Image (cartoon, helix red, strand yellow):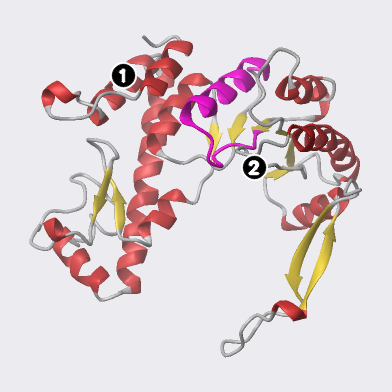
Amino acid sequence: DGDNGIATTTSRKRPSSNESTDASKSQRMLLRPEDSIYHQNNIGSDIIMALDDVVSSVSDDNTRFRIATYRTLRWLDRCFSAHRRPHDQNLFPIVQGGLDTSPGGLRDVCLAGFRLRDDLAPGYAIGGLAGGESKDQFWRVVDHCCRALPDAKPRYLMGVGYPLDLVVCTALGVDMYDCVYPTRTARFGVALVDGEAPGTLRLKGHDCADDYRAIAEGCECMACGGGYTRARLHAMLKNDSPLAVSLVTHHNLAYMMSLNRKMRDAIKEDAYPDFARRFVRDQYRGKEDGGQDVPSWVNDALRAAGIP
């Protein structure tokens, strides 16, 4: 019935450089909760994740969501039992339940189950989002989960990495994030920058061909600090230079680290509302000033966080 683990398709061996992957040579592999924890214990990361049953957030199969939510709770018990290194590895449960934030709904079912196991959980992850749902649905699930999860333990929002999303969700109570966005967008020659939404600079664009400024003034990444101008990166990217991709990747990671430092400092100084308002204002100047208006979901989310 699928309750024993996740069945995935894998190749029997890694193809060589001149060998294509043949679907007929693949086989199904069963990954049980015990297997997941065994491998994560061997890897030795500081934070490891419980094996959960994830359903696309845009699915309309309510029965499948219900099955996944209860299965996630059963698998969590098996993950805790299999965890061999609780003294130096933090096993986070992952909140599932689709977009159902109704009282007593599936998110509440999952959260209630976690509260019964709170003595075993050093922190929590919020999963099942960033899969195509609307931004209004997205922030409401994040807000709902943050209000129910304990304040004294870290809250980790999985798969979310747009700078605006980080600023808004931090206001809602999220502490940690992960996402491929900064590195993936770098591979397309797109750099992350402060300023007007969407906060990106397309280095392959014609505007950068004769622009001899750094990507961002004051940035100390390998690109900006190394003297690579927008024009030089433009030419390198147009010639498919792997070095250019590495440089933009380093810049984007440096940008995200800088953003997180600014958010952390604002929290320490009890000035996060001002920081969030300023960040949003810089991205959305308003149509009257030649920019864009603040999206309604951003205003709604910040109001829910107590930031008018």
Return the x and y of residue 197 as percentages of the image width and height. Answer: 27, 36
Q: Residue at x 81, y 40 (%)?
A: 86
Q: Which residue is drawn at 24% across and 50% down?
A: 201
Q: Please, what secondary structure does the residue beneath circle 2 have?
A: loop
Q: Please, what secondary structure does the residue beneath circle 1 have?
A: helix
The span picked out in magenta is 126-151
Return the x and y of residue 98 as percentages of the image width and height. Answer: 67, 31
Does 133 lie within the magenta span? yes
Q: How many labels does the image show?
A: 2
Q: What residue type is labelled 1?
A: Arg
Q: Name the residue under label 2.
A: 56
Q: Mark 1 points at which residue?
A: 277
**Above or below for 292 versus 76:** above
Residue that protrudes farthest toward the front in the picture? 60
Q: Distance between the residues labelled 2 and 1?
A: 32 Å
Image quadrant holding the C terminus, namely top left
Q: Residue at x 40, y 42 (%)?
A: 257
**Horizontal arrangement in the rendering, residue 151 relative to residue 224 (left or right):** right
